[in-house]
Amino acid sequence: MSATQTELSSPPSDAISALRYGAFSKLLVASWDRNVYLYDTSEAGRHLIQTFEHRAPVLDVCFGESDDEAFSAGLDWDVKKINLSTGEQTVVSSHDAGVRSVVYSKETSILISASWDSTLHIHHPKNPSHLPATIPLPSKPFSLSLTPTKLVVAMASRALHIYDLKSLAVLTAQASQPAPNIVEAEPWQRRESSLKFMTRAVACMPNDAGYASSSIEGRVAVEWFDPSATSQARKYAFKCHRQTSPDGVDVVYPVNALAFHPVHGTFASGGGDGVVALWDGVAKRRIRQYQKYPASVAALSFSADGRFLAVAVSPGFEDGTEGEGEGVVKVFIRELGETEAKGKGAK
């Protein structure tokens, strides 16, 4: 089967900050235009189902326990629960600064938000009367990612915390202090990023073995959770999303987005150069690189069955020509060939 790509109609009117596939064909998109968008991406009829207006730009969004429930985070400092059937929005907690990331763990039924106030809020949505627990962080968080058992928090100062989700769920469920209900949760591991420059994105492997992280300086690092010397010796970083200008200068772009394929365990990266590439992280090989998109790649998400890759593009102004790329905000749905994202194996 050959790969095909379609562009979603009715895209956001301003830059896209995040997009997430649900268990089936629903796709959530968060935008700086103060809205969360819900699309149906099934082949029968790709269309915009509904928009959910917010008070300020929305920086992240995720599905909850089902595809009828979503959670959003943004510059209004609030974490909101959205009933996707009725449109009802409920504030589940408020931070003291913009909320950068939000993720939901189905395995432990907890919602985690990360804010520029240098805290995590741990919510227990199935127990609405429970006050969210606040976990202090050493630096501002930039990106969150989950596996069935672990939470990875990538922060400023190249700091990285890995938490055990089950321990986090138990510890915060027992916390009953008055607001802000502070809990000193010890990470399972503390690490320093393998990348020299600021972390832009982090994404966990679907097999719960490790994670990839990316930086503003055109690099991706691949690491494993196992703290043994053997496993740690496997970690590596590589250059990507770089182009040579006509006068021979190496132009380096930020790697804005990472997403692992849920079946094959390979991963996609999206950069400020408008390029999406697929990588085999175990074999250390690039599988393929797609034709350049019309603007910077802002976010990526694979569908749960791995058949589709959603690609969000927005003006990134990485080339310094701020006026030229304005208005190029699009979401593409790429249908993958059967072996398109399959690893190639070691050389």
Image (cartoon, rainbow, N blue to C red):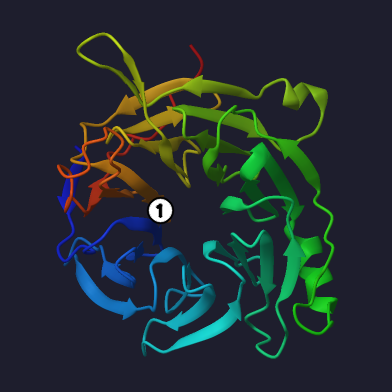
Residue type, label 1: Asp
Residue 304 appears at what percent x and percent y? Answer: 43, 56
Q: Is residue 91 left or right of residue 286?
A: right
Q: Where does residue 50 sit, x and y in percent of width and height? A: 26, 78
Determine whether, in the image, residue 309 is placed left or right of residue 226. Answer: left
Q: Which residue lies furthest to the top in this view?
A: 248
- Circle 1 residue: 305
- Asked if residue 166 can be seen in this view, the reply is yes
Count of marks placed on residues: 1
Q: Nearer the viewer, residue 258 or 342?
A: 258
Q: In which quarter of the image is the N terminus?
A: top left
Instruction: Please state if 189 lies on the left or on the right of 221 as rendered.
Output: right
Q: Which residue is drawn at 72% across and 47% down?
A: 161
Q: Is label 1 in a helix, a strand or a loop?
A: loop
Name above or below for residue 191 compared with residue 248. below
- Is 332 on the left or on the right of 142, as rendered? left
- Residue 237 lies, with reference to residue 200, above or below; the image says above
Residue at (81, 48) in percent of width and height: 188
Residue 135 screen position, x and y as percent: 75, 64
Query: Few, some or many C-alpha atoms within 10 Å of disc 1 (few <14, some 14-19, many ≥20)?
Result: few
Residue 23 shows in this picture: no
- Quarter location, residue 114: bottom right
Q: From the viewer's perspective, is residue 86 above or below residue 172? A: below
* x and y, in percent, of residue 169 in the image: 76, 68
Judging depth in this view, the residue of 325 and 21 nearest the camera is 325
